[in-house]
Image (cartoon, coloured by chain):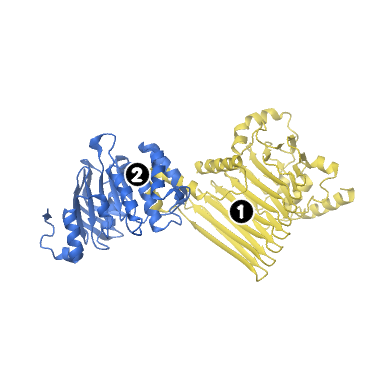
Amino acid sequence: MNEVELEELRKRAEAALSKPAAYGPDVDVTQFSVPPPPTSYEEILSASSHLLASVGVDLTGRGSAGTYLQVDEEAVEVEVRTPGLRVLNLQQALEEGIVDGYLWRAVPVDADKYTAAAELFGRRQGYVVIVERGAKIETPVQTCLLMSAPGAIQAPHNIVIVEEGAELHVVTGCLTMMERAGLHAGVSEFYVKRGGKLTYTMIHAWDEQTHVRPRTGVVVEEGGQYISHYVNMTPTASLQTDPKVWLVGRGARAYLSSVIVAKGDSVMDVGGTVYLQAPDTSAEIVSRAVTKDRAEMIARSLISAEAPGVRGHIECDGLLLSNQSRILTLPALDAKHSDVQLSHEAAVGKLSEDQIFYLMSRGFSEDEATSMLVRGFMEVKLEGIPDELRRQIEMAISMAAAGL
Amino acid sequence: MLRIEDLRVAVDGREVLKGVNLELGASEIALLLGPNGSGKSSLIQTLLGNPKYRIKSGRILLDGRDITDLPANERAALGLGAVFQMPPKLRGIKLRDLLRRLAERSGADYQSLMKMAEEMGAAHLLDRDLHVGFSGGEVKRAEVLLLAAQRPRVALLDEPDSGVDLDSLPVLGKSIRSVISQDGDRAQERRSALVVTHTGHIAKYLQATRAFIMVDGVIKCYGDAQAILRDVEKYGFEGCLNCIFAEVRRD
């Protein structure tokens, strides 16, 4: 990108730096500092290896097609092990000029103060993954964003490009290991070209001190597929995200699943939006929210039907495990064309006494019955992913259930 | 083996069992008959320890041990097992996983359970969420498999034949028979069963020895299963109400 374009982005970002997000508690982004590069990553990594394992990151790189590991604002490991695939950090990708048409195209730089902060305070880190035309990469690329510096901001800018007819699985593990408040404002822009397929699995394990504001935009072309699975396992000071998916080519398809555990004093506002802009596109959004303690959870979803022959379905269920917690589900369907099929179902409540008694009568203790039912509630359809990744997600969900 | 003494039970403040006395011997298979709403299912739920069924008075003894106040899981550990008439749907819990966990505890042979599922035409249910979208007959087959996995010493079957089409009845009946008549590890550990049946269809597969008739929350009469079934067929439960032998042993 040339200087003029970069300057233009900077100006727009500056103008948006105090613009609050539409949803979620407002956070003062200026109170967080850009962390200095740590002197030694080895210590941080070895101290967090079990945490990394819990979000599905294997530092040996076994079983993955490539690895991107970022600590704070520094890419510490960038590796690619598979032909047809490129994994690099954003800085390098910009230097090579290979993401010029993609930077801030699926997410506006001035969407809100968090995108602005990512542009202004981020150090052009974040992963860029590109799969060449027709290459089907069967093992996942693992990426990990680790926060270690207290009071700091982490603002990676990630770009994934799946070229025509290519296939890619990305699994991202995000976590914190620090004792003071931090802000994660990651930007992710994904581009799925004609007939391509991207599955994106995100496993979050933040802590009670961290504010999390991921901003994600996805553009899917004709016949392409975008499938995302999101698991949030741990309490978080606040989390607000609403990934937006544009299906711009005929027959494109999106499936978004999320399993969110909110406990302690967490405030979570998790959405998913799909715009069906081309004929015969379809989307399904499935979410499961479990709250405990005093947690507050808002589960939003919107499917907007803007072309003929499109289909969309939303399924959002909530389970309250305490009387002090709250779940608000807001499934929304927006039809701008008559030849569309849109539907939603939502159920919110507590565990049924009949179910608990039933399992107890089969010999399970009340605690066992409860945890079996909670785990069962969190079950979602995991589609389009390799078995190993499926096991990984199932393990993350089980760990999240066990923590309740 | 199972002894019920003057059991009075209320649900939502309404008395549903009004002094039930019943005794089930070791390795005995008994039928519990009666018109709709007479309290048969309430008795089964109470025996299993459903907290909604509040025991006002009376006792439940299993092998002489008072289990009246035990929670459901402890009753199960002592050997009670059930086929529910209308079990809840358990989303996200696969029949196969539940069978495996139950078999691990009870020592039931998992492979034999799989074979049994095959024979019952229930293999297609194994990887589905328990009872979610199951037909009436499928619910019963899954329940019987779960009962088998528990290896109960006293099986309580609540209308295992309701909602089952007549063609599937012989297979289901045979399976139930094999579950409840199976010898335990030791010969003296033969199982007992109390089978609620509204229609009596299942009775001929079970070789029941005795039958109880429950009317309006009490056991009106009991006696030889075949004789009682014959009488009920002839006179209906109305006949039982007017029977001069009511509450008198008839065998």
The numbered mark 2 sits on a residue in which chain?
A: B
Residue behind mark 1: A269
Whether discs 2 and 1 lie on one chain: the answer is: no
Residue A24 visible to an observer of this rendering:
no
Residue under the point 83% across and 49% down: A100
Up/down of A95 relative to B216, above or below = above
Q: Give the letter of the blue chain.
A: B
- Taking the image as shown, residue B148 lies to the left or right of residue A237, namely left
Name the element at disc 2: helix
Q: CA distance from mark 2 to mark 1?
A: 45 Å
The numbered mark 1 sits on a residue in which chain?
A: A
Q: Residue A303's spot in the image, x, y percent?
A: 64, 61
Mark 2 or mark 1, which is nearer to you?
2
Q: Residue A15's spot in the image, x, y percent?
A: 79, 55
Residue behind mark 2: B148
Given residues B241 and B144, the one toward you in this image is B144
Up/down of A84 relative to A15, above or below = above
Q: Amino acid at mark 2?
A: Ala
Q: For residue B163, which quarter of the picture?
A: bottom left
Residue under the point 55% across and 57% down: A316
User: Count of labels shown?
Assistant: 2
Tell me what hue chain A is rendered in.
Answer: yellow
